[in-house]
Image (spheres, rainbow, N blue to C red):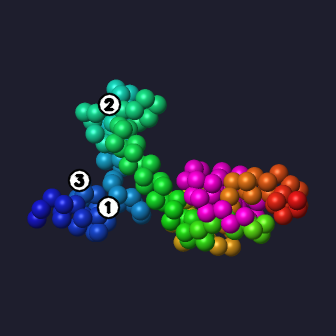
Amino acid sequence: MPPRTRYTAALKGGYCPSHVDTRLENGKRVCEICSAYYKRRYRKLVSEGFCCSHPTIPVVPGQARCRECVQIKQLRDQILKQEVVDAYGGKCQCDCGCSESIIGFLTVDHTANNGAEHRKQIGRGIYRWLKTNNYPKDSFTILCYNCNCGRSRRDDKLCPRKIA
């Protein structure tokens, strides 16, 4: 059996691809032994100034990855943000009527005004969380940065553009 097929078969069967007799915990892709090895390898490479994905290429200063990996991550993040924005209507949903649609100006708004609490629960990565949870429409919407900040600073939570 080719190596890639063996790897896939082990994962589908719920076993570690490297230690085929070790059953995986729910949602894990490797066993604890492999996980510890990958963490040690990552720390060693980063401490020596090399990319964790391309061990012979130096990292970008202040990053744990090489320039190519940083660019790939940025592209993935842009695609993910576009998917989230599209799932919530593709433009600012504020009732002031601004209809901003330039993705760089759009942000996720917690409609229950519990953003700080939610970030403590999930950490960073709101876009990934929204996608994983099938874009819940009852608690989130897309607003442009001006509307989001303007509403958050008012007690009545109304957009300053609508009031003006």
Q: Where is residue 32 in the image (x, y as percent from the top left)?
A: 36, 49
Residue 46 position (above or below residue 104): above
Name the front one of labels 2 and 3: 2
Q: Nearer the viewer, residue 34 or 163?
A: 163
Name the front one of labels 1 and 3: 3
**Marks 1,2: beta carbons within 8 A:** no
Name the front one of labels 1 and 2: 2
Q: In which quarter of the image is the N terminus?
A: bottom left
Would residue 26 be counted in the magenta stretch? no
What's the residue type where badge 2 is placed?
Pro
Q: Quadrant of the C terminus?
A: bottom right
Would residue 106 be counted in the magenta stretch? yes
What's the residue type where badge 3 is placed?
Ser
Q: Position of residue 23 (x, y in %)?
A: 32, 61
Label 2: how many Cα within 10 Å (few below 14, some 14–19, many 20+) = some
Q: Residue at x 39, y 58 (%)?
A: 28
In the rendered image, which quarter is residue 47 located in? top left
Estimate the spatial distance between the alpha carbons at disc 1 and disc 3, rounded to whole Å.
Answer: 11 Å
Q: Nearer the viewer, residue 111 or 40?
A: 111
Under circle 3, the secondary element is loop
Label 1: how many Cα within 10 Å (few below 14, some 14–19, many 20+) = some
Q: Where is residue 108 in the image (x, y as percent from the top left)?
A: 64, 60
What's the residue type where badge 1 is placed?
Arg
Residue 160 position (above or below residue 33): below
Under circle 1, the secondary element is loop
Q: Where does label 2 land, which residue?
A: 58
Question: Which mark is on residue 18?
Answer: 3
